[in-house]
């Protein structure tokens, strides 16, 4: 049965709010929501997720840019360096059975949740700049994130933000904003490799508009939330998605 407009708007708004507030997580919520709430096939859901999340990320990026929180050089570089991985992941994904794909998705979510929930040492802006990883490290991490984006059909924000915070030592607020740039670049690249996937145009547009508008609100709320709370909220959200996806996959 075709989902009602209210359901579609609520799903899109939830994704956008998460994107604007946390700088990621919309994609990892989108796939299970599109599959289990909007009744979309997994291959369609993963492709639609890339488009909806990219539009939502663009909406949230406007407010973060105004506040000067975006590291454009790192964000664009990180995204472009992961382009090959995103294309490769998209090609491999189509050959993997749905249950195996969702099972791998659960494992990835658990790893991302652990990385954000474990105790973290406070790092100030000056120390973070000194500790910033070298470009070879950025290349390795970006390629891995790009592959993840293409393979699982997600913007990669739930991996990008932990990578920027933990591996590249970017302060959490800056990582939240910069992660949106990476999401847009990765999603656009992965979409090119999935151009032959048919989508419901009306459903995609409604979801995208709702996500973009809600992302603006989330970005406005972001500076009002303590950085530590943002980090823990991100981890809890990812953990919840992992448990929910595992439960629904086991029942299928």
Image (cartoon, grey):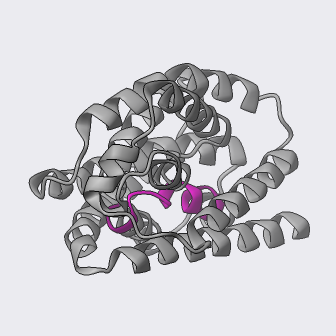
* Residue 60 at least partly seen: yes
The quadrant in which the C terminus is found is bottom right
* Residue 198 at least partly seen: no
Nearer the observer, 117 or 49: 117
Circle count: 0
Q: Is residue 23 left or right of residue 118?
A: left
Question: In percent of the image, x 60 and y 33: which residue is there?
Answer: 150
Q: Is residue 65 left or right of residue 76?
A: left
Q: Is residue 183 left or right of residue 44?
A: left
Residue 236 in the image, given as x and y percentages of width and height: 58, 77
Residue 5 in the image, given as x and y percentages of width and height: 42, 68
Q: Magenta span has 7? A: no
Classify 130 as above or below 137: below
Q: Which residues are magenta?
A: 20-33
Question: In percent of the image, x 24 and y 37: which residue is there?
Answer: 72
The quadrant in which the N terminus is found is bottom right
Q: Magenta span has 23? A: yes
Classify residue 110 by image quadrant.
bottom right
Q: Is residue 113 left or right of residue 110?
A: left
Classify residue 193 by image quadrant.
top right
Residue 96 in the image, given as x and y percentages of width and height: 83, 35
Most common secondary structure along the magenta stretch: helix
Spot the residue most to the left. Answer: 66
């Amino acid at each position: 049965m075709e989902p009602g407009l209210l359901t579609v708007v609520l799903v899109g708004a939830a994704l956008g709010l998460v994107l604007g507030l946390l700088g990621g997580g919309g994609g990892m919520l989108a796939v299970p929501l599109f599959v289990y709430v909007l009744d979309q096939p997994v291959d369609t859901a993963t492709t639609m997720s890339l488009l909806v999340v990219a539009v939502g990320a663009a909406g949230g990026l406007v407010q973060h840019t105004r506040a000067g929180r975006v590291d454009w050089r790192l964000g664009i570089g990180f995204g472009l360096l992961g382009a090959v991985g995103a294309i490769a992941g998209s090609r491999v994904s189509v050959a993997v059975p749905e249950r195996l794909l969702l099972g791998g998705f659960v494992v990835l979510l658990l790893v991302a949740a652990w990385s954000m929930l474990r105790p973290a040492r406070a790092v100030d802006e000056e120390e973070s700049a000194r500790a910033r990883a070298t470009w070879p490290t950025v290349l390795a991490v970006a390629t891995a994130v790009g592959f993840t984006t293409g393979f699982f059909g997600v913007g990669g924000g739930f991996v990008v933000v932990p990578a920027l915070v933990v591996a590249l030592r970017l302060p959490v607020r800056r990582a939240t904003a910069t992660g949106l740039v990476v999401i847009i670049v990765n999603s656009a690249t992965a979409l090119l490799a999935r151009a032959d996937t048919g989508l419901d145009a009306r459903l995609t547009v409604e979801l995208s508009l709702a996500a973009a508008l809600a992302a603006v609100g989330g970005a406005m709320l972001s500076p009002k939330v303590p950085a530590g709370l943002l980090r823990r909220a991100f981890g809890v959200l990812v953990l919840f998605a992992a448990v929910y996806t595992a439960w629904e996959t086991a029942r299928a």
